[in-house]
Image (cartoon, rainbow, N blue to C red):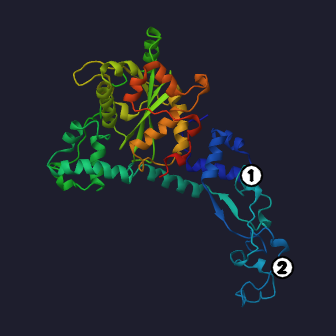
Amino acid sequence: MAIQKHLVLSDRIKIELGLKESLSFKAIGRDLDKDCTTISKEVRYHFFIRKTGARGNPFNDCLVRRDCGVRHLCNPCTKHGHGNRPCCFCLKCSSLCQLYVKETCNRLKKPPYVCNGCEKLAKCTLEKAFYSAEYAQNEYEICRSESRSGISITEDEAKNIDKFISPLILKGQSIHHICSSNPDLIMYSEKTIYNYVDYNIFSARNIDLPRKVRYRPRKSVSNYKVDKKCRLNRTYDDFLAFLKINPDIPVVEMDSVLGIKGGKVILTVHFTKSELMLAFLRDSNDSRSVLDIFDKLYLELGPDIFKKLFPLILTDNGSEFSNPSAIEYDAQGNPRTRIFYCDPSAPYQKGAAENNHELIRRVVPKGNGFNSFCQDDISLMMNHINSYNRKKLNNRTPHDVFSFFYGSDVVNKLNLDFITPNDVVLQPSLLKK
């Protein structure tokens, strides 16, 4: 069976012929050496609608058209010679009649989802769906062309990076200098930044670049944004090996909760033993904001408490975590934690944090951004979440268990407040102002 191969026009012609012969998706797939779900998706994604009548009857998809006796919806009648006939014979009745109820053919709700090969086609006056090889091929080519063109950046992301990059370009700095000097703030490659300048999405233009207007484009070796070998000796297998040697070491899981693309982001830090989670609001999803949070925690907690709380961190492969050595060592080069990465596309390997994110989504549903919130709002939300009883903790709260493990002094330094059980709110109303 062919896997990961695009359909071509000849394949689509065979699909169209198979539908006319009323073949099943499985039979068509066998003929094309494709999975039946591939044929199903192709038909459902590329059919078109026609509003045509049948022999001797105009298009009419009203549910009561057979028993309808309504007349004179248009006064005078716009159809010459139809003044005494029911309005169901006129194409305008559906837009004028208050009794109109649309009827949809039930056959379109199940395979083959189209009217190709239907034996009732000659008598049907309902809305029809058809699959055409030529139409499907044109749609496919347009979609393929659009997916390979344009820019993959939102308006808010463009504004954020423009505020930082354009003033530096206008000072005479090159894009290479800007990217190499600020790897934790610019989460794009040099080539991408040059492309965005070409697309005129920044205030700075090509004319502002010192050498761009004088040299032809040339091939160059791609430069990595941050640590090229950040996963070296930090894979999930390395993590399991480390735990085998140090079975009693507490694990902290780190992740990001995204809002609207290009907007504010939450960094979550989850203590697996106590189920307590910290959350920090960031203006953008870059590496620099993550480093700033850990540097602030290291300064406020002190080296001893920080090392006790964060001896081992497990995170995913997001680009915001691609500078692990800056988190693992302080400014003087002293070790303060260890970082390991989950396998790609394996969020279940840090499932405790992922499960806790569901509670965040109760307060801020998916699809809503964090732009209207401040850190105090996020801290309030986490206080309610951390004061929520957990069956896994023998019906105790993460706040209670964390206090038992680390003491009230650490709790106070992290500004954690306890919410009484009957006052816990896990609804969007908690953060409505």
**What percent of the width, then of the height, locates residue 33?**
63, 38
Mark on residue 276?
none
The answer to whether residue 417 is seen in the rendering is yes
Q: CA distance from mark 1 to mark 2?
A: 38 Å
Tell me: 258 left or right of 161.
right
Mark on residue 69?
2
Residue at left offset 43%, top offset 32%: 416
- The quarter holding residue 129 reads bottom right
Tell me: 109 left or right of 367.
right
Helix, strand or loop for disc 1: loop
Residue at left offset 53%, top offset 52%: 140
- Please report contact status of discs 1 and 2: CB closer than 8 Å, yes or no: no
Q: Does residue 231 sit above or below 266 in this rendering? A: above
- The quarter holding residue 268 reads top left
Looking at the picture, which amino acid does disc 1 mark? Glu
Q: Which of these two is toward me, 211 or 13?
A: 211
Q: Which of these two is toward me, 169 or 51?
A: 169
Q: Which of these two is toward me, 315 or 115?
A: 315
Q: In this figure, which residue is indicated by the disc labeled 1?
A: 21
The mark nearer the N terminus, 1 or 2, is 1
Tell me: 232 left or right of 240.
left
Crowding at label 2, few (<14), some or many (≥20) Cα neighbours within 10 Å?
A: few
**What percent of the width, then of the height, locates residue 255?**
44, 32
Q: Which of these two is toward me, 254 or 214?
A: 254
Position of the N terminus, as image quadrant, is: top right
Helix, strand or loop for disc 2: loop
**What percent of the width, then of the height, locates residue 35?**
64, 38
**What percent of the width, then of the height, locates residue 347?**
51, 30
Residue at left offset 61%, top offset 48%: 42
Looking at the picture, which amino acid does disc 2 mark? Gly
